[in-house]
């Protein structure tokens, strides 16, 4: 099912709600988790510890592309910064929003291709980011 938000949306890139493996690294920790949503410019994830907004991260994504009858995993890596950290009421853990602030064009295009292809295949499109 495709749902779109049209109210005062400032986002520029499609956002895919999907669980994609991601590793977040900085000097103090490495966290392996999954995205809740992903776009060419950022991701939203659940983590098990509080991470201060404006923390810079090295990010590694594993994108599962469907090619005919096979799934080919492409690894992309780049830098990002946490722009929002939210506690989850009644649960342990935090939701974080990560902006991809230092990403090569080829990696941004690979993410965009994955999002666009997945939206067509699965209908997981929600809004623009």
Image: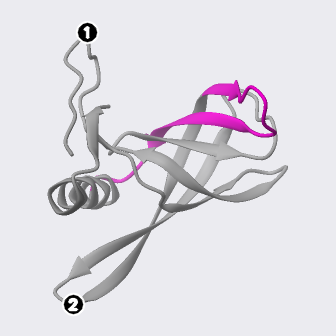
> If the image is split into quadrants, where does the C terminus sit?
top left
* Residue found at x 78% / y 30%: 90
Toward which corner of the image does residue 70 lie, by quadrant?
bottom left
* Residue found at x 64% / y 58%: 33
Q: Is residue 72 visible?
A: yes
Horizontal arrangement in the rendering, residue 127 relative to residue 31 (left or right) = left
User: How is colour applied across the structure in the image?
Assistant: one colour
Q: Secondary structure at mark 2?
A: loop
* Mark 1 surroundings within 10 Å by alpha-carbon count, few (fewer than 14), some (14 through 19), many (20 or more): few
* Mark 2 surroundings within 10 Å by alpha-carbon count, few (fewer than 14), some (14 through 19), many (20 or more): few
Toward which corner of the image does residue 67 lie, by quadrant?
bottom left
The earlier-in-sequence mark between 1 and 2 is 1
Checking the image for residue 8, the label placed there is 1
Nearest the viewer among 20 and 42 is 20
Q: Which residues are magenta?
A: 84-105
Distance from disc 1 to disc 2, alpha carbons, whole Å, reads 40 Å
Q: 36 above or below 86?
A: below
């Amino acid at each position: 099912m495709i749902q779109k938000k049209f109210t005062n949306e400032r986002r520029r890139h499609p956002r895919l709600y999907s669980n994609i493996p991601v590793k977040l690294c900085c000097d103090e920790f490495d966290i392996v988790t999954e995205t809740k949503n992903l776009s060419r410019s950022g991701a939203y994830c659940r983590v098990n510890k509080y991470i201060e907004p404006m923390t810079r991260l090295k990010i590694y994504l594993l994108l599962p592309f469907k090619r005919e009858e096979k799934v080919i995993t492409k690894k992309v890596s780049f830098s990002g910064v946490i722009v929002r950290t939210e506690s989850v009421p009644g649960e342990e853990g935090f939701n974080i929003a990560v902006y991809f602030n230092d990403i090569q064009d080829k990696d941004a295009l690979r993410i965009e291709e994955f999002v666009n292809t997945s939206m067509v295949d699965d209908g997981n499109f929600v809004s623009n980011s």
